[in-house]
Image (cartoon, grey):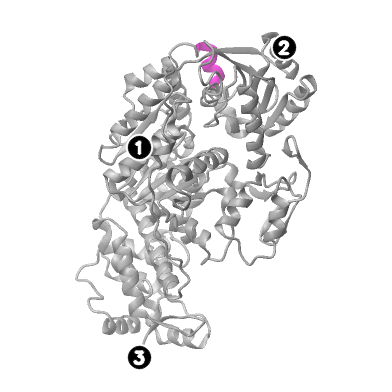
């Protein structure tokens, strides 16, 4: 009898032995040598249950469904001496999810593997060496072992689905390459800032020659971290024969901007942009869905939510991308945004990615968090920029004077301050979109035709249009006042003579200062930190109060690096557990509870809608009747998307074809309104 793995709609039959061999070899070839035996046998045994005559009848006659995934897992359990072996978890979950240890060990689970003896007999007749002399397992400390199980689960899921898609001829084969575009090198200007940027970039080039490891890249705002770090990653990956780069950004606006730069640096087809506003629901075989599930392009640009939650996931679709991290350079931008309540498990896995999975990690920030104060310190961290050079660069590029206002300000105080300054340009940054909209309405009455608004309630194309206008007005030294949320703070290249920043976490204040006197046109720009009576977002409350205490005691106009360290030390002391409970769950191999416990809250947990602005209506009309949307389609639509909260204030949208479309008001000045 020919045992089959699948029959395609056009009646092509794939032999089960062929499928098992393919998955076994693909899995083994994807992982470092010490994990290859486990990966190979997980691949060889994952569909053992398909050797039942009942399952073969179900396949050929489209009959009642027959369970097949537990058989290989139960075989591994029978061969193990005590603890469930890694293969039991990996195989048991490949069609559902990684389960907890108690379920895997229970008699109820073992009873699911009905007909195991029949399956084993048939498999051994078809496949030589189906049973090894000794069951391979993962012999590592618990936390590293726990992550290795999740990574090998990812590899098995990926190999299994890839082999099926290749047999069905539904997989588009692409040979991705990426090269560095030298046309985007730093300018030849010889001013102080340009010289500092070249020195910074040269350090990145020099350190790229080092072996894999964990690196810290620290530099003041405006020093050119985006291109310098990308160059480091590219050269480092070439030197160490690595397979690509993963960039992890904290905010959608930074991710979008970085993806655009990376496309210029590495080529359009080499870059995959994957975040909440850029994740279409397609059939599994469609190109973009496959790319985002696999992270199979050489350059991935993604969000902290996608990255951190995937590290702890237990479901096949979310876990599948983990295999795309193996042997990659991982750039963590704004590393201070690693959630403090998850910092211990995240740091532990970053260590593990380097130790066991061939990765390099780069922690990038102008305000590096004080991870060294934690018990679980990162291993052998190398500073790309030497500490004394970092201090010198911060002093050399100190382009602002900070002023902290103790009194509570209202909008009329900001208007008065602007008028008294005599300046015709200024940036005002507040903590909520509601406050930004309110401020725009008030200031635009005081300064007609001179005010602009920027927030995440505007689609990227709209924000880009506003920034283009603002930059031109700044360049021409014409009147311009921009009222913005924190979307302006990190990585956005604008240069105002004065910045007003509502009291916020210290790292946000320093990022805001990076938009002031950015190019050093003045001796010093002014950064005015003010209090407002309005409430702060939940994630801001403790960090803002901590900043308030620090500002009451210390002057930001002195040496700012020790103040940054003090801030983060206090922050981590407050979150002293930092995910200790999650580590205990990981040690007990409770994969479902771990996944449930690791939730990173930001704009990923919102609904992405396409707004009617610019060319979006024409695109919606073109795409509304398509069976599915391609990656190019979504790239076009993404410029017109806005993330809205999942609450009763933002329900005015509908589905047109495959697209969620906002049908409420979209203000041409400030975007979606509550």
Q: Quadrant of the N terminus?
A: bottom left
Which stretch did the figure color magenta?
Answer: 547-555
Element type where label 2 sits in the image? helix
Does residue 137 appear anywhere in the picture? no
Q: Are marks 1 and 3 in contact (CB under 8 Å)?
A: no
Q: How far apart are labels 3 and 2 at the CA level?
A: 89 Å
Image location of residue 126, percent across then percent down: 28, 83
Residue at the spot 67% in from the left edge and 25% down from the top edge? 482
Q: Which residue is mark 2?
A: 419
Please determine whether, in this image, residue 621 is positioned above or below residue 418: below
Label 3: which residue?
1
Between marks 1 and 3, how big is the CA–CA gap? Answer: 56 Å
**Magenta span includes 548:** yes
- Please tell me whether mark 3 or mark 2 is closer to you in this view: 2
Whichever of callouts 2 and 1 sits on the residue coming sooner in the sequence is 1
Q: Quadrant of the C terminus?
A: top right
Give the camera-side residue of 459 and 322: 459
Circles 3 and 2: CB atoms closer than 8 Å: no
Q: Residue at x 51, y 38 (%)?
A: 250
Q: Secondary structure at mark 1?
A: helix
Q: Camera-side residue: 330 or 322?
A: 330
Residue 232's label in the rendered image is: 1
Q: Earlier in the sequence, mark 1 or mark 3?
A: 3
Decide: is 116 above or below 274.
below
When asked about the image quadrant of residue 481, the answer is top right
In the rendered view, does 503 fall on the left or right side of 167?
right
State the residue at coordinates (51%, 88%).
61
Regarding residue 602, the answer to whether it shows in the image is yes
Q: Position of residue 91 (x, y in %)?
A: 38, 67
């Amino acid at each position: 009898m020919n045992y089959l793995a699948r029959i395609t709609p056009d009646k092509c039959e794939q032999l089960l032995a062929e499928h098992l061999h393919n998955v076994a070899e693909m899995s083994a070839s994807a992982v470092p040598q010490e994990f290859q035996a486990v990966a190979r046998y997980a691949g060889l045994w994952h569909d053992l249950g398909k050797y039942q005559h009942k399952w073969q009848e179900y396949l050929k006659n489209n009959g009642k469904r027959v369970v097949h995934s537990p058989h290989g897992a139960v075989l591994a359990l029978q061969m193990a001496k005590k603890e469930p072996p890694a293969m039991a978890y990996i195989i048991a979950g490949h069609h559902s999810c990684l389960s907890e240890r108690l379920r895997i060990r229970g008699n109820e689970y073992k009873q699911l593997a009905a007909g195991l003896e029949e399956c084993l007999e048939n498999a051994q007749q078809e496949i030589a060496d189906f049973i090894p002399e000794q069951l391979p397992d993962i012999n590592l400390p618990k936390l590293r072992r726990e992550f290795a199980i999740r990574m090998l689960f990812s590899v098995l899921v990926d190999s299994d689905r890839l082999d099926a898609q290749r047999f069905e001829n539904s997989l588009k084969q692409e040979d991705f390459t990426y090269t560095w575009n030298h046309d985007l090198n730093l300018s030849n200007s010889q001013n102080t800032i340009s010289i500092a940027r070249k020195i910074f970039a040269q350090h990145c080039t020099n350190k790229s020659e080092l072996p894999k490891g964990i690196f810290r890249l620290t530099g003041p705002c405006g020093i050119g971290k985006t291109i310098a770090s990308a160059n480091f990653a590219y050269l480092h990956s070439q030197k160490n024969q690595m397979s690509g780069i993963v960039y992890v950004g904290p905010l959608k606006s930074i991710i979008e901007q970085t993806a655009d730069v990376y496309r210029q640096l590495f080529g359009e087809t080499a870059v995959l942009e994957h975040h909440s506003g850029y994740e279409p629901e397609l059939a599994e075989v469609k190109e973009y869905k496959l790319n985002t599930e696999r992270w199979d392009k050489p350059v991935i640009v993604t969000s902290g939510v996608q990255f951190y939650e995937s590290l702890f996931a237990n479901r096949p679709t979310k876990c599948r991308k983990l295999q795309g991290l193996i042997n990659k350079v991982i750039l963590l931008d704004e590393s201070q945004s690693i959630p403090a309540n998850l910092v211990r498990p995240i740091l532990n896995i970053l260590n593990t990615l380097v130790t066991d999975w061939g990765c390099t990690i780069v922690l990038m920030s102008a305000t590096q968090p004080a991870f060294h104060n934690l018990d679980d310190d990162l291993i052998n961290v190398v500073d790309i920029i030497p500490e004394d050079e970092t201090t010198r660069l911060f002093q050399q590029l100190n382009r602002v004077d900070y002023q902290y206002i103790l009194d509570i300000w209202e909008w009329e105080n900001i208007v008065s301050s602007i008028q008294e300054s005599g300046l015709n340009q200024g940036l005002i940054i507040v903590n909520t979109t509601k406050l930004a909209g309110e401020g725009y309405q008030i200031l635009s009455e005081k300064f007609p035709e001179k005010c602009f608004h920027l927030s995440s309630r505007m689609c990227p194309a709209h924000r880009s249009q506003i920034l283009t206008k603002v930059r031109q007005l700044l360049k021409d030294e014409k009147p311009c006042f921009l009222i913005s949320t924190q979307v302006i703070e990190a990585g956005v290249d604008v240069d105002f003579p004065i910045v007003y920043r509502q009291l916020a976490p210290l790292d946000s204040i320093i990022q805001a200062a990076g938009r002031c006197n950015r190019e050093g046109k003045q001796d010093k720009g002014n950064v005015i930190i003010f209090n407002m009576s309005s409430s702060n977002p939940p994630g801001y409350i403790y960090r803002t109060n901590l900043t308030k205490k620090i500002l009451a005691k210390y002057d930001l106009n002195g040496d700012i690096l020790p103040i940054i360290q003090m801030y983060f030390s206090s922050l981590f002391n407050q979150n002293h557990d930092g995910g200790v409970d999650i580590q205990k769950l990981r040690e007990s191999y409770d994969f479902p509870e771990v996944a449930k416990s690791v939730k990173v809250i930001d704009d990923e947990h919102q609904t992405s809608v396409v707004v009617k602005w610019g060319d979006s209506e024409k695109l919606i009309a073109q795409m509304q009747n398509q069976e599915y949307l391609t990656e190019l389609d979504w790239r076009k639509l993404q410029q017109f998307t806005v993330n809205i909260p999942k609450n009763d204030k933002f329900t005015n949208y509908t589905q047109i074809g495959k697209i969620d479309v906002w049908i409420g008001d979209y203000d041409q000045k400030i975007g979606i309104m509550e």
